[in-house]
Image: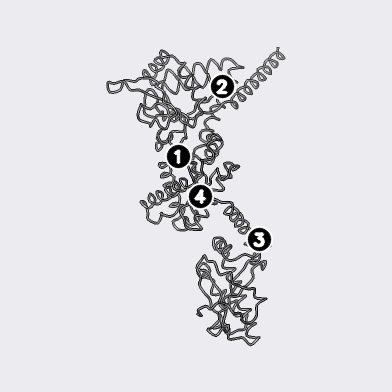
Amino acid sequence: MRRKNILRGLLCTVVLLSAALVGAQEVSARETVLIAGNADLYPIESYDSRSDSYVGLLPELYRRVSECTDYDLVYLPYSKNTTQAQQAENRQADIISAFPAGTVDSAYLRRSELFCSLPASGKLQKICIGFTSALPEAQAEEIARALDGIGAAERLGILAVSVKDGGASLYRTRWLVTLAALGVMTLGTGVALGVLVRKKRAELKANALIDPRYGIGNDGYYLNCMETLIPAPLRSIVYVICIGCDTPSLERRFGEAEREEIFSRAAEYLRLDCGREEYLACVGRGMFALVCQCGSREAAQQRAEGLIRGLDGYLAGFRAEYAGAFRAGICSLSENPDCGAEAALYNARQGCAHAFRTETPCAFSTRGMIAESEQLERLRGSMSKAVEKGEFEPYFQFVVDRAGTVVGAEAVSRWQNPEEGLLKPSKYIDLMIRAGTITELDLYMLRCACVQLQTWKREGRGTLWLSCNFTRQSIADEKILARVREIVEQYDFTRDRLVVELTEDSYSRSSMTFPSHSRPAAWNCPAKRAW
């Protein structure tokens, strides 16, 4: 008897596991369709905060459609700040549910289906559902047919139950069916487990595409739009616009909390400005991507410039200093035909970075710009040890009087990078300022100037003066005077022959400079006004 019980238990376990695996396999083969619900249209559809779910006639019909098709119809998370119209415009939902005719612009919907009539204020009110262009045509037709297959009498019966007791009987019926299923020890448990896993996966999939901070798509939503919603024939007119800001700069100016407020305001404006056939997503901290269709390169540039101008005006309404925080970069898929979603976003980001460097509202990404950005990334990784390794060399720009006699010189740096070759200051000064390593370079050049002045004095040229540059960041260092004194006191030269010049934080010097080890004592350089 005991052996029979053990065998029976083992058999039940095997059947349970088999059913669970079948349910899991069924889950993986199904697709999720996202629904934007109407929280206020009781009893057709409404949001129940106690159960954290939508209830009424339509949720029950969606459940039945899920059972007879290969799609999981799942509601997007409820939000007080996001309307159905916004979700339709932003293409966040596949189905816009339970809206009275005329309340959602039909231009945003692939089709609008008459669903039922409801007495309201003594009149019949048409209640519709709409399929957005985010849902492929074939899938929309299949779901529409499934809804039409539920007869009018059955719909009225479900509606009557909902009106009578707020849907409680409907959920009690589900509970009894579930209990009956649990009574079947084998197949029932496996099916229930499969349904639970399917529902959780569908909810996670829906939540995974939305940025909860701003109510718009996230980077996963952007990738999904680029890979599934853009037909190949339209790629030639598709542009990816990256709207970004200098996050560290904003945090230094306004603090972390105010910086996040700027991001939220920017997301709010971009969401409202997102047009038809456009997809908006947050793809990083203070970074947004807009996928749009434009008939020409000029039209794409006008769209990007209009976005930045409008965003500046919107942010300035909260605080004037917020204007100018964002720039835009544009990547054209027609100019980059082999460009995937991630590569297109990377290219657009390079255009955004270039717009910041050139102080323009927007910039197209080019191959040269991308190559330059990649070079800057390489330099950023190697510059921290460059001064310590002695890779910087002093170059002199001589100053002559009216008679052509050399009276002094200005010491400037050049980076002899092992991989990139000889680099001018315009390639690395800004990088070092942002990285906080510019002070070490300024002090290194000061030491080189002191060595040269000491050499000139010993050679009988002690009347020559030499200037070296210090950035504002270096001068602002409270320890800079002590470090300068420590360096200067190590060398023997007349102190008034050394000139310290305060420069702009970003500059590019003339290319007419010569290595200190290869020039004569005097050089016929262009005249320069003496200090």
Q: Which of marks 2 and 1 is nearer the N terminus?
A: 2
Whole-percent x and y of residue 474?
Answer: 53, 69
Whole-percent x and y of residue 18?
Answer: 65, 21
- The residue beneath circle 1 is 215
Residue appearing at x 45%, y 55% in the figure: 255
- The residue beneath circle 2 is 192
Q: Distance between the residues labelled 3 and 2?
A: 63 Å
Q: How far apart are marks 1 and 4 (CA)?
A: 23 Å
Frontmost of labels 3 and 2 is 3
Q: Distance between the residues labelled 3 and 4?
A: 26 Å
Going by the numbered disc 3, the residue's amino acid type is Glu
Q: Mark 3 touching mark 2, by CB under 8 A?
A: no
Name the quarter where the N terminus is drawn.
Answer: top right
Q: Is mark 4 on a helix, strand or loop?
A: strand
Q: What element carries label 1?
A: loop
Q: How far apart are marks 4 and 2 (CA)?
A: 49 Å
| Colouring scheme, one of rainbow, by chain, secondary structure, one colour | one colour
Going by the numbered disc 2, the residue's amino acid type is Ala
Residue appearing at x 52%, y 74% in the figure: 501
Position of residue 250 relative to residue 136, above or below, is: below
Going by the numbered disc 4, the residue's amino acid type is Gly
Frontmost of labels 1 and 4 is 4
Position of residue 173 relative to residue 222, above or below, is: above
- The residue beneath circle 4 is 329
Q: What element carries label 3?
A: loop
- The residue beneath circle 3 is 420
| Marking on residue 345 | none
